[in-house]
Structures are given as structure tokens and as C-alpha cells.
Amino acid sequence: MVKIGIIGAGRIGKVHAESISKYVKDAKVKAIADPFLNEETERWAKTLGIQHVYKDYHDILQDSDIAAVLICSSTDTHSSISLEAVKAGKHIFCEKPIDHDVEKIKSVMEAVKRSKVKYQVGFNRRFDHNFRAAQEAVLNGKIGTQHVIKITSRDPEAPPVSYVKVSGGIFLDMTIHDFDMVRYLSGSEVEEVYAIGSALVDPAIGEAGDIDTAIITMKLANGAMAVIDNCRRATYGYDQRAEVFGSKGSVAVTNDTASTATLSTEDGVVAEKPLYFFLERYMQAYANEIAAFVEAIVKDVPVPVNVVDGLEPVLIGLAAKKSLAENKPVKLAEIKSLFDL
Amino acid sequence: MVKIGIIGAGRIGKVHAESISKYVKDAKVKAIADPFLNEETERWAKTLGIQHVYKDYHDILQDSDIAAVLICSSTDTHSSISLEAVKAGKHIFCEKPIDHDVEKIKSVMEAVKRSKVKYQVGFNRRFDHNFRAAQEAVLNGKIGTQHVIKITSRDPEAPPVSYVKVSGGIFLDMTIHDFDMVRYLSGSEVEEVYAIGSALVDPAIGEAGDIDTAIITMKLANGAMAVIDNCRRATYGYDQRAEVFGSKGSVAVTNDTASTATLSTEDGVVAEKPLYFFLERYMQAYANEIAAFVEAIVKDVPVPVNVVDGLEPVLIGLAAKKSLAENKPVKLAEIKSLFDL
Amino acid sequence: MVKIGIIGAGRIGKVHAESISKYVKDAKVKAIADPFLNEETERWAKTLGIQHVYKDYHDILQDSDIAAVLICSSTDTHSSISLEAVKAGKHIFCEKPIDHDVEKIKSVMEAVKRSKVKYQVGFNRRFDHNFRAAQEAVLNGKIGTQHVIKITSRDPEAPPVSYVKVSGGIFLDMTIHDFDMVRYLSGSEVEEVYAIGSALVDPAIGEAGDIDTAIITMKLANGAMAVIDNCRRATYGYDQRAEVFGSKGSVAVTNDTASTATLSTEDGVVAEKPLYFFLERYMQAYANEIAAFVEAIVKDVPVPVNVVDGLEPVLIGLAAKKSLAENKPVKLAEIKSLFDL
Amino acid sequence: MVKIGIIGAGRIGKVHAESISKYVKDAKVKAIADPFLNEETERWAKTLGIQHVYKDYHDILQDSDIAAVLICSSTDTHSSISLEAVKAGKHIFCEKPIDHDVEKIKSVMEAVKRSKVKYQVGFNRRFDHNFRAAQEAVLNGKIGTQHVIKITSRDPEAPPVSYVKVSGGIFLDMTIHDFDMVRYLSGSEVEEVYAIGSALVDPAIGEAGDIDTAIITMKLANGAMAVIDNCRRATYGYDQRAEVFGSKGSVAVTNDTASTATLSTEDGVVAEKPLYFFLERYMQAYANEIAAFVEAIVKDVPVPVNVVDGLEPVLIGLAAKKSLAENKPVKLAEIKSLFDL
């Protein structure tokens, strides 16, 4: 039984606590820490059987009974807490992104390398049944040599501008999942990026220096090409699709719905909308990723999404940012050289 | 917190124990009883935090701390254990069918009526997201006045002949769920039944006096008609569909699949098969039905599937049996009069 | 080039004339006859290049240059015109049904047998791309041994009561196509029929002694079972589906739509309704059936839908009628013996 | 009745002749001309009722009874024949592209402007039921303000390298239809283009200086973005899809199939592949475009796809070519300025 401490009791911290208690057999959440802890959270923790509720996450790091931590705090604290946790010898599951600052990711990467801790990054979509089925088809040679990877990723609602301002921009906040998906589905690395985009959903997002709609094309090391289209707002719900096309054919995955019900009337044939947002769509994926992390600890095997997998999408995001700013394709090598990578 | 005892640690008893521990917040399984208890089951019970593991279910009935029991033993024991449990003042969730013998169901019904216990019958499909969505469309008037209800229900594999012999026949064993679904979707009662059927899948089933493929048509009290088609074996998996057609249109639900992946190649456009069998398809429905049972206890409101809902499909099944034997339509009233109902 | 005369310039007569001129290479409509001929029809005939427009169909029968006639007049005239046409040595394509009176069909059948004329009956659905694909799957062994054949057939709008009164009843007017489809898809004969039905769409149809909604189950000679559900009115359009289920799997065909467009908005995911009615859905099937008739003439091979295929669905319809009236299953043998068949 | 002469009796010339004879009421093909005329073509012309078959297209231009010509000859002759036909006062339907050379298109454009002839370009996809349904949804405001337009366009088989060499390259030969579709669906102009691509299907295409797989992103004048993905070979058939996403939702169109049949077996749930190639998919669209051309002549209204619609996709194609060669985004204005446009 792997004892776990969760650092950060916000939405995603709670999701992990609940999914571990329901679905992850070999793990138990022993403690949770959050500086803004309130009574409601304490009650919630009690019903889940979480023994300790701390304000200070150091209390978790000092508990030698706790083997692993989940870093679910705000993004700007991920890297420093990661470093402390490595020092404390805890296995680490860190929500994405590790940081927006590549130097900080590098320091985490090096600390992990020198240690014996497992370090997994929270790219939950890799554990979604649909994307996994697509990847399996690719791995099993069903589509032959890859030609084109296409990803559509649209949120049901744009975040508040206050969030957008600290988000690191759409590429590091939202597209980062899709960059990871390109790497996951292709099993290859991105070599060059070109991005176009605009604030079409909310002009306030544009005034905040960001965009809300984008198309990003990529050249991959394996010779294939990829394209992502993003939007911060789709009225019909969370739209998460992918297609991999190759020499033998194509595999496509589309959205889950709440039911298979179809209503046929004078007005048309109406099916359900996609599940509304990530909690609905990816709840099982969250459980799966923690189960995989726990399994890596228990069996002492490599984690399925390591610190390099955490770094690469940030680099791609920075390339996309530069491409958008300068309206030209940007090579990953150029970004990497900035950081001696 | 409703403390629960489970009587019977076979497949379905275990499914309930696990789904309660994962999904049902206000309940806890305190004890489980099974005469054929082995070490593996004991270990399994321990990992779920079940305190007591008994050979004799009377140990559960005598525990005054236990408020409710789940009767998951073999069908022939359902009614007698039900009577004992009513006497012990336990709320009861009984797997379907209560019994094949209407007199025994009647005695349970009368005992329940004289008591204050809640009695829910395990028609899990009412708690499936797809069938529920269909029912909601009907209830919300989306299809207008009902004209025709159609149900397709096919298992992925025929049971062994040994099972068929004690099953009560296809109508009481398999179609009983579909009879319940006709009542659930229509909100009406069946008045007349006509059944045809044959052993097309396995001649040994025919030799055992049963059939494996059937079509059953029904006239309903609300003026609508219904039709069920059943088969004990569909090579492509568990096929569970329904359609309700009426004056304003039609609502149809089809099968769930493991993913939305579609593979397009020279050979065609291939989607996933339906989920293989009831554990895959109805796992969430099992959790939902127990949650509803617990809620009925906690809030002291009527259970959603009561003892009459347990009786009616058995009567319809007996009518179907007679119809098949005599090759003529059989009125429910005729069956009911046999039992002074 | 097969010269054709069309008897009856109503809707279906015009459909055939137009589809022949567009799609049937080896045929030419030389004349059309209709007692209620008006100027508009004459103009229409001219634009299609039809040389002669007669009031009296005998003018067609007397034209030795005309090799084949299409009988598209009212049902009550089909058999007598058939007999005259056989006598005149014309190949005959007769719209369904040949007659409601089995004796009259028998006399046509005998006349045809004694002659050398080809006689094809207008069961157009056999020439529809969807039903044909289903039949091919069955013939190619894709579904193994047949277990269950299911047909859904609903019209977009109920006919006027005046029509219902002379229609011969729903089974001979509407279901007759579905009876034919059961024979087509199964390649087997119907042995027993049980029908339930009601006037749920329009009480006036009930007052006229007919029903508008029905479910008909059948036992087939090959051991399979079949079920048809009919309704005179589906708000969402012409609903024409079929499924054949067997030991190796199932083949299902559904409706065509005007486009593949799907609109996803706040209100749901909306696809197009089925094509509105038979002219939209079966236009190509009408052309295909005449092409097959012409090919049978040109190559002197048997027609694909012969006079027996015209008789059998009428017998099944009469069995259904009797079954509905007496609320019991009716054997085809019983109906046949009434007519020394 | 508009009398038509067809210049060029290759595949597309024959398609037009046949579809006019079947579907276009107000037009008649009087003559067809082709320098490589053989007996088979003459016989074919006779069966369609085409009076004259010439080797020299000037015979058509000199026939004052002929009101309109269809230019279906090889691309390199389109512009010069167009100029001659304008001079001869014939209305002109010209297959795409008018030319690969912008100066030649300009001279046609100017000649047409000074004349009274109608000049329509053969972008047949605008007349396809699916793309038309998508455009109607956009025009009717169903998706609100446009954000992203996505087009997938894949051929079932790569052309021979000999063809590739004279094709003008993938952008002018294949993508030109998709550029037109972006303009059609958006109702807006392309302002900037970025293209990536590679010879992934056939290295010989790469050796011939062309690519066979491409992704092209575009910025549009209306603020929206567009992306096209192309491939010269999809094993599963002709893949022609589009999606327009906007502030209120999304409309998507997918492929047509030969039937709606779905086969469910142990191996999966298999649907039909897309229709194989453009003749199957767009046959009706070809008829519709000529009918629209004829209607423009008869009613003296503007043609639906004019000479500017013929020019713009060529300019976009040239921008894409330059973008690919120089690996940078290219503004349409830059291309236009090269040609004083």
C-alpha cells in the first residue's frame, strides 16, 4: 500500500483524492495540505478517510511514512516543491506543466536524474480510453507509416481574463496537452512549429496579450506532419478529437457523450452533446494515471510520462509562442539551444 | 451511514460489495455471508474493509447494527431469506427474480406490506444511463403518445445447459429484464403476450426444454404495443438496445463501446463492438441502484423498484411461457386469476 | 431498344416514365395511356419524348411495336389489364399488388404460365442499395444461419381516410412491401403469422375499419423468425430499416439522408432526418427495377420478381388480416388451402 | 433549350454529356469535338443523341445554333480556347483551372468583362449536397461568427508520375478545389498562406519535384482561419470532409457511402468505405453545376462560379507553392502584386 500526500486541495487535488479512494487499489491518501484550508475541505477529507489535513505541505514532506506526493498546487510552485520533494526522497506526481520557465524544469530534471525518485507528469489524456485506442492502432501498425496527425481541442468555456493573464498563454496552458498528444500518438518528436491565432472568442483575451483560437502545424522527426486546432470556447461542450492518418488508413477518435440516446422528431435527429468538460470526460483517465504512477513505484519500473515528457511540450509551446509573435516557422532546435538542451 | 450485510458472495454479491465501497457514499458493507466461503473470498473481503465474513447468513440477520441486506444468493432461496429478513426488520435489496413461484412472491409481498421495511428488486437496467435517457425523453413528452416500444436484448454467449435447466426458462431468466424495461419505458402495464421462439443457437438448449431465440409481442394498458427480440448468443457482444416511438417522434438508445475509435482501411470502416457483457455495460448501473436503495432508506421515501415491480415481470414471463407452449396470445388477467391477483 | 407503353399516368406511372428516360439505356417509352388525361400530362409526355398519349390503354396493347407494358393504373384494374396484356403478348411489369383477390392473381399466374411473356411485380425495395447490401451480406454468409429478421417501416404521413377505405387495409397496402422484404432478405417462405395493431395515429382510420400501427411476427420455413413494425405516420420522415441477425453476426441498414451535415450547438448534435418519402428514397430503386425488367426481356432470362413473388405477400397479408381479426396465429397453409394453392 | 457544344471528349467531357442528357432539362448537347476521336466515342455520342462529332473544335465555335460551350480539353488549352469562344460569342463553362499562368487567366478575365458571355468555372464541389448543406448552415447563421474552417481532402490513389509532372503541382492540381471550398464556405478571401508538405506516399513524386501530402493554413479577410490537409492516397477511398466552427457551434460534413449497411461480427462493427472517387461522389454535383450554368444563361443572371472565382484559387495555390519553397507564410497581396492585381 503506497501512502500518498497531496499538496494542494484545489479542484484537481480533490479529483485525485477521490479517484484514488475509489479506483486505485494499492494506494491510500494519508495527508493533504493547502494553505487556504477551510472547514468544508476538512470535512470532505474526513469522509475520504484522509488522516491528516495540513496548512503547510512541509508536514507531508517530513512524514517518512508517506512514499509519494501529488503536486497539485499553483503552477508557479510546481518546480520548487518538486525540488524539495526530491530532496525528501518522495516519489512525485506533478500536475502539468512543471513550470513555464525551462531553466526551472531543467533543474528539476537534473535533481530527479541524480535521485532515485519516480517523477511523473500529469498528462492525463494519455490515459483516456479513446486516445489510448488511437495510439494502440498506431502502435499495432494498423495505419502503416504515419502521414498526418490531427488534433481538435476546444474548451466549452473561456477562462476569466484574470486567469488568462497568469496562464502562460494558450500554448503553455491549453495547447500543451495537445502537444503532448502529438508526441504520444506519433511516438516521435516535434522539430518545427508554425502557429496562427487570434482572439475571436473574447476581445478581452486579446487585450490581455493572449489569443483564444489557434491553428498550429508541426513537422515531426519521423517525417509526418501534425496540426492542432484550438479554441477556448465551443458552445456544444468539450471537443476532444484526434485522427492519425497513414499509409494503410486512418484511426479517428471522437467525443464521449452522456448517453447514446437519439431523438428523431420533426426538428431533426438529435444526439447528445459531448461531455461538458474535463472532469466528466477524463475522470477515469485521472484514476488511470495515478494507478500507473503507483504501479511504477510498487514494481519499480519507469513511469509512463517522465520529466522529459514534461519538458518537451513546454519547448514546443515556446516555439509556438515565438512563431505566433514573429509569424514564421520556428525550429525546436532554436528553442533548445537557448537553454543548452 | 447505512450498514449493509450481503447474503451470497458469488459474482453479483461481489459486484455490489465493490461498487458500494467505490461509489455509494452513505453506505458501508459490514458483513458478507456465503456457505461456500473460501480463503480467496475472505482476503477479498478484507481488502474492501468488510469486517465480518460469515458462512451462515443468519449471523447477518442477527446483527442489529446492520440496517439492510442485499440478497444475492441463488434464486431458489430469495423468497425464504426475504421472509426471514423482513421478520428481522432489515431493509431488503433482492436480486431478480424474487422467485419463479408466484405464490412465494405473494407471501413476500404480503410480509413486506405488513412491515416497515423497504424492499427493492434488482432490475439494474433502470439505472443505466442509456435506458434512463430514453425514459426521460418519454416522460418529458418528447415523443408524444406512445405507439410502439421495441427492445433488443442479446447475450454474448449462451449459458451452459446445466444452468439453462435450473434457470426457469429464457422468459424468467433473461427476458424478465426486458419485460421490466417495457414497464419502465412505457410506465404502463402489459395486458397480453404472444411469444414465438426456438433453439437456434444450441440444440442442447432445446433438448433441455428451453429456447434460445425469441420474439415476444405485447399489448399494453396505455394502448401502445411492445416487441422484444432475444437471443442467447450474439457473436459481436452484449446487444442491448431500445426504441420508443410515438406521435411526436422516436427515441432510440444503442450500445456503449470501449472507445469511440474508428479505423478506416482498405477493408472498411471499423468501429468497436458493444461492451462484452453485463459487468462491463452495467457496472455503473449496479452502483446507481444501490445508491437509490440507500437513499430510500436514509430519506425514508419509496424505493424506485418495489416488490410489485418484482412480481409483474414474472407474471409476464409466465404468460409468455404459456403463449409459447400453446401458440396463442395469453392475457395477463388469465395468469393473475390463477393466483388470485 | 425495348419499346414500352405505360398504362396509367398517375404519380407512379410518371416516376417510371422519367426514370426510364434518364437511366434505362435499352428502353424507350413510346406511349402512355390514362382515361383522365389532361393537357399538363400531355405537355409533360412531350418533354420526355413520348410519342403517343392515349385515353384508352387498348391503343397501347394494339401497337405491335410495343414489346412491354407497365401497369400503373388503380389496383382494381391490375389483374384484368394483366390478362389482356398477356393475351396481347406484351411483357408486363405490374405495380404491386397484382390484386387483393387471390383468385384473380391465380388467373393471372396461370395465364402467364401458359404464355411466353415476362411478368414482373413492382416490389421496388428489392432494388434499393441499402436492402440489397443487407441481402448480399446474408447471401454471402456474413451473418451465418439466420435467426431473426427485423423490419421497421413507417410512412411520414397517414393517407386520407378515403384512400384507406379502398386500400385493402394496411397489410395489403403498406405491409405488403415488408412481407416481400422478409421473403427477399431471408430467401425463405413465411409459414405462420401473428399480428397485433391499432388505430393510434388517426381514429378515423379505426372507424374506417383499418389500423395504422401494427406489429407482425412470423415463423419462416428456414427456421428463422421475423418481425415487422409498421406505422402510417412518423413525424421525422420515411423510416425504412432492416436487420438480419444470425449465428455469425448481424447486418443492419438504416435510412438515407439528404446530406451528411451535422450541426453541433448548445441545443445538441443535430443530423438530418431520413429522406421524406418513397419518391426521394427509392427513385434510384424504381429505375433499377425497370432496368432489370428490360434486361430480362432483352436477354430472355427470368425476371427477378415474378408472379409468385406477387402472390405470396398477398397471402401473408390475408393471414395477418385474419390473425388480427381473430387474435391468434394463422398458418399460411390455412390461407392457401382456401384457394387450392 | 440551350444547345451546347463540348470541347474535349475525355473523361470529364463525357461525364458532362451524360449528365446533361439525364438531368439538365433545358439543355441539349448538339456537338462534341476532340482531336483524338475514335469510333467508340462516336458510337457513344450517337446513343446520347449528339448530332455532330468533330475533330476540330472550331466547327463548334462556328455553329451559330450553339449557344454555349463546355471546355473540357487539356488544361494548357483552356485559356486560348476560352478567348476564341468569347470572340465567337459563346457562353463558356470551363473546367478548372482556367490556366496555371495568371497572365493568361487575366486575359480571359478581361475578354469576358468586355463581352456579354457568361463564364463559369468548374468547381463542382460547390454543387455537392454535403458541402452545400454546410454552406447553408453558415449562411443561415447557425454557427455564428466563423472561427475555423477545416477541410480534409484525400484521393484514393496517387496519379502516375507522368501526370504529376504536368499537373502544375499538388496545390494547383488538387488543393485548388479545397482553396475554392475555403472561399465558398467562408464567403471570404484568403489573405495569407503557409504550407508544409512532403512526398510520403510515393518518393517518385518527390523526385518529380512535387509533394503528395500537405497541410496548408490560411488567414482569411473575415478574421477566421482555415486549414486544409491533403493526401494523394487514402487506402479507404475518396475522403472529402469539411467543418466550419464558429461562435454558436459547428457544422461538419463527411463522406457518402454506397449503402448504410453495418455488419456486426466477432471482428467488429464494419460500415462501408467512402465512395471510391470523384465520379461516384460528385456525379450529381456535375449535373447540378451545368444546370446552374444553363439557368444563368436562360434567366440571364450571374453565374454562380465566375472567372474571379477561377482566378483566386490559382493565386492561393501560387502562394502555397512559394510558402512551401521558402518555408514561410506568404501574403496573397504579394502574389497579386506580381501580376498587377
Image (cartoon, coloured by chain):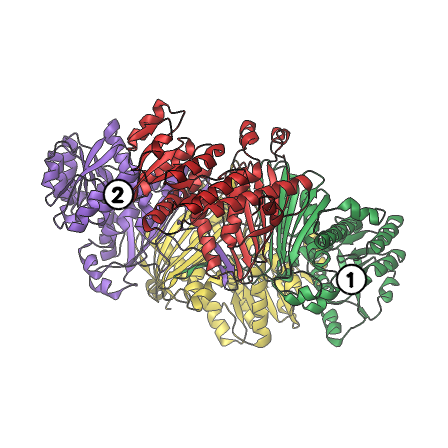
Chain colours: A yellow, B green, C red, D purple
Residue drawn at (33%, 33%) of the image: C62
Q: How crowded is mark 1: few (under 14 residues within 10 Å), some or many (20 or more)?
A: some
Which quadrant of the figure has residue C94? Answer: top left
x, y percent for residue A71: 57, 62
Indicate which disc residue D18 carries.
2
Q: Mark 2 lies on which chain?
A: D
Which quadrant of the figure has residue C48? Answer: top left
Q: Relative to residue D88, is residue C70 drawn left or right?
A: right
Q: Nearest the camera: B207 or C37?
A: C37
The answer, for residue D189, to whether it is visible in the render is no
Q: Secondary structure under badge 2? A: helix
Q: Relative to residue C304, is residue D216 drawn left or right?
A: left
Q: Which chain carries label 1?
A: B
Badges 1 and 2: C-beta atoms under 8 Å apart?
Answer: no
x, y percent for residue C240: 50, 44
Q: Relative to residue A195, is residue A153 drawn left or right?
A: right
Q: Nearest the camera: B103 or A184?
A: B103
Indicate which disc residue A263 carries.
none
Q: Secondary structure under badge 1? A: helix
Residue drawn at (19%, 44%) of the image: D98
Task: Say which amino acid is labelled 1.
Answer: Thr
x, y percent for residue C192: 62, 50
Query: Which quarter of the rendering shows the N terminus of chain B?
Result: bottom right
Task: Say which amino acid is labelled 2.
Answer: Glu
Indicate which disc residue B75 carries.
1
Task: Work out how far the residue at label 1 is from the one at label 2, CA to CA, in angstroms.
Answer: 70 Å
Q: Do the residues marked 1 and 2 share a common chain? A: no
In the image, farthest residue toward the front: C114
